Image: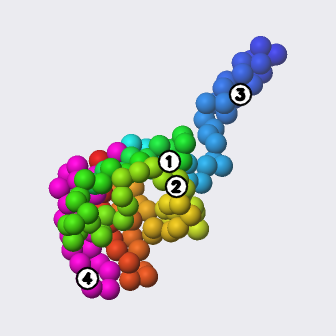
Amino acid sequence: MKTKIFAFMFLLGLAFFFGCKNNDDDGSATQTNTLQGTWHLRNVSGGFAGINVDFDRGEVKWTFNTSTGKLEVENNVPFANPDFDYTLFVSGTYNYAVTTSGDTKVLMIEGLSYGTVTVSDQTMTLDEQGTDGFLMQFER
């Protein structure tokens, strides 16, 4: 009888050990980690004037390093090009963070908000349209 109880308790313990997972994760780490890597700016639209500007792959690259909290921007759009104004940053390295407010993730670069960030496997959007800002679309 003791052997059966021990075997039952052992199996029950294994079920709890392998069947449980940590539910303390609110998903913010997942959102932040999906930023990791290089993103190509493909389109900027919206704003008060209602602009719609497409960029060729490689013209503007943002590379996020989630370990260091650094964003490296490579901007190959000539300064004299009128579309340069919509690229936001000159080439360089910037500090960034993702803050959370409820279900909303906001990308902060050098302490300033650049809108709600939404990331999937291959696309990222920054949405400032709630404040007459821009919608920026990136792809891996």
Q: Name the residue furthest right.
A: 2
Q: Which residue: 59% across, 54% down?
A: 26
Q: Which residue: 21% across, 71% down?
A: 82
Q: Earlier along the polypeptide chain: callout 4 or callout 2? A: 4
Asked whether residue 8 appears in the rendered view, the answer is no
Q: Earlier along the polypeptide chain: callout 1 or callout 4? A: 4
Q: Earlier along the polypeptide chain: callout 3 or callout 4? A: 3
The kind of residue tagged 1 is Lys
Q: Earlier along the polypeptide chain: callout 2 or callout 3? A: 3
Circle 2 residues within 10 Å: few <14, some 14–19, many ≥20:
many
Inspect the magenta stretch and tell me whether residue 29 lies in it.
no
Residue under pointer 2: 96
Q: Earlier along the polypeptide chain: callout 2 or callout 1? A: 1
The kind of residue tagged 3 is Gly
Q: Which residue: 32% across, 80% down?
A: 47
The reply to whether discs 3 and 1 touch (Cβ–Cβ < 8 Å) is: no
Residue under pointer 4: 50
Q: Position of residue 99 (x, y in %)?
A: 57, 61
Circle 4 residues within 10 Å: few <14, some 14–19, many ≥20:
few
CA distance separating discs 3 and 4: 61 Å
CA distance separating discs 4 and 2: 27 Å
Please, is residue 13 above or below residue 58 in the view? Answer: above
Residue 13's tag is 3
Query: Which of these two is toward me, 122 or 39?
Result: 39
The kind of residue tagged 2 is Tyr
Which portion, as a residue range, is magenta? 38-59
Residue 70's tag is 1
Side of 123 where 53 appears, left or right: left
Foreground: disc 1 or disc 4 = 1
Query: Which of these two is toward me, 114 or 19?
Result: 114
Side of 132 where 28 appears, left or right: right
